[in-house]
Image (tube, helix red, strand yellow):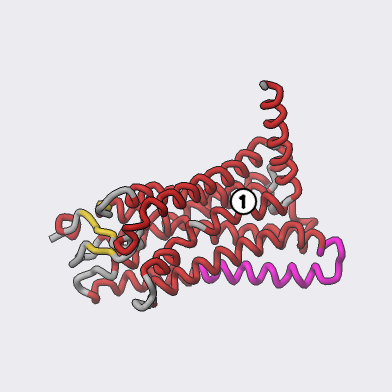
Amino acid sequence: MNNVSEISHFFLSGLNETRNYHLTLFFLTFLCYVIIILVNVCVILTIILNNELHEPMYIFLCAICMNSLYGTAGFYPKFLSDLLSPVHVISYSGCLLQAQVLYSFACSDLSILALMAYDRYLAICRPLEYHSVMSKQRVITLVCLAWSIPFCIMAVNTIITSRLKLCSPYINRIICLIWSIVMLACFPSETTVNSVVAYITILIYVLHFLLIVWSYMFLIKTCVGSLENRRKFMQTCVPHLISLCTFSLTLLFDVIYIRFGSKDLPQTIKNFICIEFLIIPPIMNPLIYGFKLTKIRNKILIIFLSGLNEIRYIE
């Protein structure tokens, strides 16, 4: 019998131990989501509406902020409704869709960060070739690939997960993740293909990370002997490194927990580890770049001051 006919809904039990704090969690979560939307939309509009920011580095930044809105939309609305509901249920198809969105968001983020590292490598190490290699059309194509390829890779993971016969509708988490669904399979032998595809996916994105490391090895080597290059590195590469470290560490903790999670951890800590990649990078990325990159910071200040002047004029 098809597993869809057997299990039509999943019960998410990750919030069961926090029933007394649901209203507080709702307020904090809602505030966090509003901040994520505001800071990312602010950076996106600043870049789109200013022609002088239509450069590769800023286009990649715009892409990563858009990706943050996409990924968080797959989590926060459902989580907020769960906090106001006594029963935390999600449909079978909705669970697979959420897993697809969250995984493709994480993989796309790493792909865009890899493109940003390569962009900085070309700008500092091979400046004469930069504009010919990083044309606006090519940058847009690369961004589209950074969104579409991870989506397709994760779609393969989702499709092979949907064929499994499941023996339980209970997921001990606050979100749907592919491996959480795979762990519910009736026959472990059927999950071999899932494991193989999962490890291939992990390998692909480990290679992305190695590309970033390779780019920075050349960047550091080039910048050591030049004051001008060191200035460029501090101005444009440091924000990228902070974003990369933040994202990599949050994702690493999440992957380790998903694959080898400890049953001894309190449920609250498990929940935070599970969703930290949906909290920290979406807030940190626009704030780091907004404060560190002079052009964006200046444009945002101009918009803010213009708004204040209009308010005073109306009064």
Which secondary structure lies at badge 1?
helix
The quadrant of the rendering that contains the C terminus is top right
Left or right relative to 141: residue 95:
left
Residue depicted at x 54% and y 59%: 280
Residue 5 placement (x, y as % from top left): 15, 55
Residue depicted at x 41% and y 53%: 24
Badge 1 local density, few (<14 within 10 Å), some, or many (20+)? many
Left or right relative to 223: residue 25:
left
The quadrant of the rendering that contains the N terminus is bottom left
In this view, the residue in front, 221 or 38, is 38
Residue type pointed to by label 1: Pro
Residue depicted at x 39% and y 71%: 258
Main SS category, magenta section: helix
Residue 304 placement (x, y as % from top left): 69, 36
Per the image, is 216 magenta? Answer: yes
Left or right relative to 153: residue 237:
right
Residue marked by disc 1: 286
Q: How many marks?
A: 1
| Residue 57 in view (yes/no) | yes
| 207 over 293 or under it: above or below | below
Left or right relative to 111: residue 223:
right
Residue 272 placement (x, y as % from top left): 44, 64
In this view, the residue in front, 315 or 220, is 315
Residue 229 placement (x, y as % from top left): 82, 62
Per the image, is 114 magenta? Answer: no
| Range of magenta residues | 205-230
